[in-house]
Image (spheres, coloured by chain):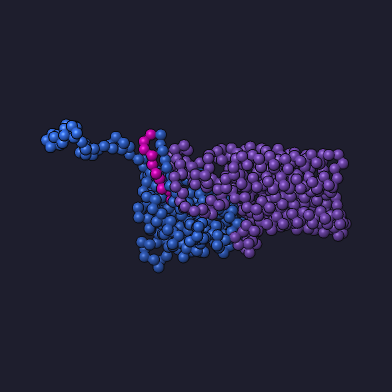
Chain colours: A blue, B purple
């Protein structure tokens, strides 16, 4: 049903630390790997070995350059996937009821057997979180690895989204953002977690932790230089003789 | 937005078809018999043909019937209901007019109202989208409705009314372009709010997430050359509105000039609708550094 639930028991989501992300794209690959062989239709690639390859991904990492008015420039890697919005515009526009938000945990999912592939939900999403699979003709999106997080066949440490499990830098965190005492909620409170495009009114559940301003180290640049002075100003001994001999030549 | 031919054909021709059904339902012209048959054949060919064209952009058209289920929240679902109801009610009206030589006035009015509501629901599919600031303005339904009504009047042979309505639709078209040009900036969404990083001038997209293209870039990041957009706007205004008005107000304009006016209007309408999609800036383009605002 495409009516949004009035409230959800939990607000499961991700907290992404832009200060820690190193831009390795491991989350992109592990996401594609898990989701192409589990929930729903595989994530197809078109012309995968040809001149113009493209494919469906549920998570992508952008990179941005920030040049503040003062202080050094900064490069920020920016992973982006579905934010599982509380006021998800992608859900209400769906004509078939394929797109829905779960009352129990707030995860936004697509029932692929009801999806007609009209693409309107992707039009309604400001974040580019939904991609229409070119082969299957159905809408694909992040499921928050709904088939991992409740899966009792997996060891307990694996019961979290593939992107979170694989991140080598520990830049991705998973938990209940509706519970103010959860680890993720406390992280958001401590680090000033923020919403993307708050003016769109989507109330995203996923939060982003801003990068800390880069320390200005320009005045410390020659910290080792005194120890590496290459030329003696006033050579003595053998070097002094060599200097004079070369001058005379 | 990607100006897909199926969506341009759908919105242009179904708009014209339902505009014509509006006038036929109201009894302008009050036709019966074989003349009515020709009018209704044209109206249904346009309306149904347009709706069928829209099915071509679906990934799984075999499940299209499911689109009737979510009328409570979805404008697309409401459009499905309204279009079918309008076509069915007008079919009863048309059957009686063509074969029984009677016009059921009240049924006609209901059919006319449903036809108008169908065009409104089509316009709201676009008008509701906050993600496309150019469309997310009150003038979007006014624009699509005035165009549909003016085109309907033209097809219904209501020469004087059509000339006046075309002039009105042209004014709305220009206003829609004017407001639309500043809409992305006015929406307050920019790369800084999209990423939560920096200020609008201090942040720049450095590297995209993928080396090739993808669905998002193909569907949402269509960029039209500014120069061509100006030229195309002039073509749309001239062919879609200006020339038909001139042809209609020539005294004693007969079927030949009327046909020329229709052909010119359709060419202008399709140009205008191409621009409607091609010029629309989806905010997701910001993440790729493809929007200047």
Left or right side of B54 for B44: right
Q: Nearer the viewer, residue B251 or B128?
A: B251
Q: Nearer the viewer, residue B12 or B74?
A: B12
Residue A198 within the segment the image draws in magenta:
no
The residue under the point 71% across, 46% down is B269
The residue under the point 36% across, 48% down is A20
Q: Is residue B227 visible?
A: yes
Quarter holding the C terminus of chain A? top left
The residue under the point 47% across, 63% down is A36
Q: Quadrant of residue A99?
A: bottom right
User: Looking at the image, how many numbered discs can be counted on the residues?
Assistant: 0
Residue A224: x, y in percent? 23, 39
**B280 lies above or below A46:** above
Span colored in magenta: A70-81
**B177 lies above or below A174:** above
The residue under the point 64% across, 39% down is B230
Q: Is residue A4 visible?
A: no
Q: Nearer the viewer, residue B24 or B273?
A: B273
Q: What secondary structure characterizes most of the magenta part?
A: strand
In the picture as drawn, the residue positioned furthest to the left comes out as: A237
Quarter holding the N terminus of chain A? bottom right
Residue B213: x, y in percent? 51, 53
Residue A51: x, y in percent? 50, 57
Left or right side of B286 for B39: right
């Amino acid at each position: 049903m495409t009516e949004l639930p009035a409230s959800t028991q939990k607000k499961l989501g991700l907290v992404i630390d832009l200060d820690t992300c190193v831009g390795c794209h491991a989350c992109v690959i592990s996401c594609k790997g898990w989701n192409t062989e589990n929930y729903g239709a595989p994530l197809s690639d078109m012309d995968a070995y040809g001149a113009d390859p493209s494919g469906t991904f549920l998570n992508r990492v952008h990179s941005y350059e920030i040049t503040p008015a003062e202080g050094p420039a900064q490069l920020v890697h920016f992973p982006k996937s579905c934010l599982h919005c509380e006021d998800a515009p992608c859900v209400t526009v769906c004509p078939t009821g394929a797109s829905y938000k779960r009352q129990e945990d707030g995860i936004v999912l697509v029932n692929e057997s009801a999806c007609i592939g009209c693409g309107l939900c992707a039009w309604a999403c400001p974040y580019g979180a939904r991609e229409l699979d070119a082969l299957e003709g159905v809408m694909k999106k992040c499921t928050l690895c709904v088939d991992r997080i409740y899966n009792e066949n997996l060891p307990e440490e694996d019961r979290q989204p593939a992107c979170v499990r694989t991140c080598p830098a520990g830049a991705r965190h998973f938990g209940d953002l509706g519970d103010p005492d959860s680890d993720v909620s406390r992280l958001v409170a401590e680090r000033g977690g923020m919403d993307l495009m708050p003016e769109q009114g989507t109330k995203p559940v996923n939060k982003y932790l801003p990068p800390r301003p880069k320390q200005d180290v320009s005045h410390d640049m020659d910290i080792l230089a005194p120890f590496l002075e290459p030329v003696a100003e006033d050579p003595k001994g053998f070097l002094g003789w060599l200097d004079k001999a070369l001058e005379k030549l | 937005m990607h100006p897909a031919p199926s969506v341009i054909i759908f919105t242009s021709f179904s708009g014209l078809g339902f505009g014509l059904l509006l006038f036929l339902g109201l009894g302008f012209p009050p036709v019966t018999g074989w003349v009515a048959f020709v009018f209704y054949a044209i109206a249904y060919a346009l309306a149904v043909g347009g709706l069928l064209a829209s099915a071509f952009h679906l990934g799984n058209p075999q499940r299209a019937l499911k689109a009737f289920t979510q009328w409570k929240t979805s404008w697309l679902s409401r459009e499905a209901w309204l279009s079918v109801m309008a076509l069915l009610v007008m079919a009863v009206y048309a059957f009686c007019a063509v074969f029984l030589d009677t016009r059921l006035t009240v049924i006609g009015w209901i059919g006319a109202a449903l036809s108008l509501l169908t065009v409104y629901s089509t316009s709201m599919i676009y008008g509701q989208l906050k993600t496309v600031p150019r469309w997310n303005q009150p003038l979007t339904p006014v624009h699509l409705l005035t165009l549909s009504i003016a085109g309907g009047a033209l097809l219904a042979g209501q020469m004087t009314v059509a000339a006046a309505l075309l002039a009105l639709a042209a004014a709305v078209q220009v206003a829609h372009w004017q407001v639309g040009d500043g809409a992305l900036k006015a929406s307050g969404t920019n790369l800084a709010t999209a990423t939560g990083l920096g200020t609008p001038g201090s942040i720049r997209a450095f590297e995209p997430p993928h080396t090739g293209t993808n669905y998002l870039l193909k569907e949402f990041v269509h960029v039209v050359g500014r120069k061509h957009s100006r030229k195309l706007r002039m073509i749309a205004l001239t062919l879609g509105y200006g020339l038909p008005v001139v042809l209609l107000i020539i005294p004693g304009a007969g079927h030949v000039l009327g046909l020329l006016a229709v052909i010119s209007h359709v060419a202008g309408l399709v140009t205008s609708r191409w621009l409607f999609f091609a010029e629309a800036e989806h905010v997701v383009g910001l993440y790729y550094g493809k929007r200047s605002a």
